[in-house]
Image: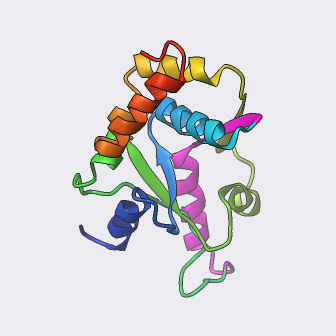
Amino acid sequence: MTGDNDWWALGQHHGLLTPLLDWSESPFVAFYFAIAKALELKSKNCSVFCLFQHSVKEINDKINKDNNIKTINGHKPTIKIFKPLSDENDRLVSQRGLFTRGPNNVDIEDWFKTYQEDSKYMDVIKFIIPCENLGDAMAYLNRMNINPSTLFPDLSGASQYCNFSIDINNYK
């Protein structure tokens, strides 16, 4: 472990509330987590967000160069994109995880609205997915080898995989 964010990342993957926002480099892994949460909450819709990292870098550069933007607790209100260097966290590796850490009490959508000028990019994209046939979607992801046993390579992941095999038709 090299720094605070490495410790935050490890803690977050074990349920600790942290200042980090979890992302995946894989849209299919992100879809898995959206579906899993929707099944848990019995939601009518679930969402997957995509973030264009280049836009974050460009806006951060502008914020850091602008002397009129005040610091908060000694820091400019930038969003840090963080990929832990450690491979000690098997879950993080399996999930192709990375994190953002932004200014306290500011969500990413509001941050873009505040600091983004005319953008030529789609900086944040939100896909809203109706929660119909989620079991079929989970079975499809399982056939792609995206399932609890691969995303959580430990006993809890194996247990959840077995439960999905019982609860979801045609999961195997």
Residue 119 position, x and y percent, is 70, 46
In this rendering, is residue 165 above or below 160?
Answer: above
Decide whether residue 138 is among the magenta residues: no
Q: Residue at x 33, y 33 (%)?
A: 150
Residue 62 position, x and y percent, is 60, 65
Q: Is residue 73 left or right of residue 117?
A: left
Q: Residue at x 50, y 18 (%)?
A: 139
Q: Is residue 43 left or right of residue 138?
A: right
The answer to which image quadrant residue 112 occupies is bottom right
Residue 124 position, x and y percent, is 66, 44
Q: Is residue 67 visible?
A: yes
Residue 12 position, x and y percent, is 43, 61
Q: Is residue 48 visible?
A: no
Q: Which residue in the rendered view is the most extreme toward the front?
A: 166
Q: Is residue 116 left or right of residue 73?
A: right
Magenta segment, which residues? 44-69
Foreground: 110 or 155?
A: 155
Q: Which residue in the rendered view is the most extreme toward the top?
A: 170
